Amino acid sequence: MRKLTEKKIVLASHNAGKLREISELLAPFGIEVVSAGELGLEEPEETESTFVGNARIKAHFAAKSANLPALSDDSGISVDALDGEPGVYTADWAETPNGRDFPMAMKKVWDKLEAKSAPLPRTAAFCCTLCLAWPDGHDEVFEGRVDGSLTWPMRGDRGFGFDPIFVPNGKEETFGEMDPSEKNAMSHRADAFAKFRAVLET
Ligand SMILES: O=P(O)(O)OP(=O)(O)OP(=O)(O)OC[C@H]1O[C@@H](n2cnc3c(O)ncnc32)[C@H](O)[C@@H]1O
Ligand SMILES: [Mg+2]
């Protein structure tokens, strides 16, 4: 595994919620972080059908554009009774002509479960793949997940995306209700980050 010796990286994401969480996770390591948006980088098209594939696209694009190591995050929620949907297409399910609408996407997921009379608990997992890529084309990939179940109606406005309907196993609150530091200690992103730490600790 290649270690990260550079003290500055690009966060190859345009999602404000992810940027906040990843910045918090990176804070103890004394690495200067600049986001793809701050550098004016475009968003590459996510044309792969796997989290790993899309994470690689985003990290390599940013690393080459900025000539710095770049860390990307591809993530989503996989619902068991929907055969893993929306999964890698989670953001696509929220797409509207006027931008993303996550309450609409969450309702679509719940309505599909109702239409199937899916039994309770309606289990699901958030998945996260982090990819660290260097300008020379090398990369390292780290995968994480957190298991839980979906609830309805939506609860909480402290997170982002699908957080208001996801209750992690062993908890009562949704990720949307939880203290952000509690989510960030147990989430799919935290799980992947725990593996990513190995490249930071030299
Ligand atoms: O590609 P970037 O620019 O990083 O940002 P994005 O929002 O498009 O991110 P993805 O392509 O990985 O799409 C994943 C979607 O899954 C959802 N998601 C991922 N992690 C989440 C989390 O911790 N809490 C709630 N929803 C999450 C969220 O709605 C994301 O938009
Ligand atoms: Mg995306």
Image: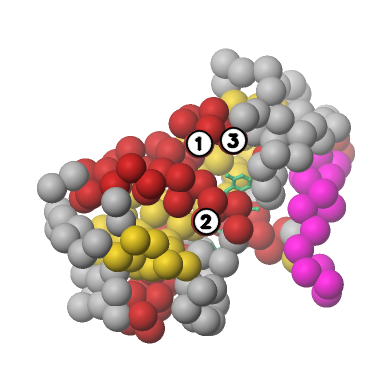
Q: Secondary structure at mark 2?
A: helix
Query: Which range is magenta?
Result: 96-112
Location of residue 94 by image quarter = bottom right
Q: Amino acid at mark 1?
A: Asn
Which label sits on residue 62? none
Residue 82 x, y percent position in the rendering: 68, 42
Q: Secondary structure at mark 1?
A: helix
Q: Is residue 157 left or right of residue 186?
A: right
Q: Amino acid at mark 3?
A: Pro
Q: CA distance from mark 3 to mark 2?
A: 13 Å
Q: Amino acid at mark 2?
A: Leu
Counting every numbered tag in the picture gives 3
Quarter of the picture containing the N terminus is bottom left
Which label sits on residue 19? 2
- The residue indicated by pointer 3 is 180
Contact check, label 1 and label 3, Cβ < 8 Å = yes
Q: Which is nearer the N-term, disc 3 or disc 2?
A: 2
